Image (cartoon, rainbow, N blue to C red):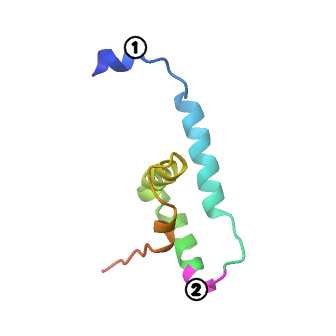
């Protein structure tokens, strides 16, 4: 696998990836006027407080949607329930 990966030219450097992830995280943290204040505010707070845990997965889901591999409608149907 390493031999194969070494043969593929790098298009996105680690610094470029970090910059893109930073832009995505800033977008997630940007305050906007939510349609349903309580539900939307809780999502923003969750992402802000737990970005280091879920940020990579959020970025992967966004990329799958942008690449046409997933339907963006699933985002509206997704609820996260945390049970203590």
In the image, what residue occupies the spot 48% across and 60% down?
71
- The residue tagged 2 is 38
Q: What x and y, as percent, mark residue 80?
A: 40, 74
Q: Position of residue 17 (x, y in %)?
A: 55, 37
Does 38 appear above or below 14? below
Left or right, 27 with respect to 51, comes to: right
Quick one: 70 or 47, which is closer to the camera? 70
Badge 2, how many Cα within 10 Å: few under 14, some, many 20+? few
Of callouts 2 and 1, which one flags the residue occurring earlier in the amino acid sequence?
1
**Front-lying residue, 31 or 79:** 79
Frontmost residue, 80 versus 18: 80
Q: Is residue 70 magenta?
A: no
Q: Residue 43's mark?
A: none
Residue at 31 percent across and 80 percent down: it is: 83
Residue identifier under label 1: 7
Left or right: 25 in relation to 57: right
Quarter of the N terminus within the rendering: top left
CA gap between label 2 and label 1 equals: 50 Å
Residue 74 in percent (x, y) is at: 46, 67
Question: The magenta stretch spans which residues?
Answer: 35-39
User: Considering the numbered disc 1 on the image, is that residue within a helix, a strand or a loop?
Assistant: helix
């Amino acid at each position: 696998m390493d031999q194969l990966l070494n043969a593929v030219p790098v298009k996105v450097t680690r610094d470029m990836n970090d910059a893109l992830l930073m832009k995505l995280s800033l977008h997630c943290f940007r305050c906007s006027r939510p349609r349903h204040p309580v539900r939307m505010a809780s999502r923003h707070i969750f992402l802000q407080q737990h970005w280091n845990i879920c940020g990579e997965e959020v970025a992967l889901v966004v990329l799958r949607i942008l690449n046409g591999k997933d339907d963006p409608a699933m985002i509206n149907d997704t609820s996260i329930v945390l049970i203590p």
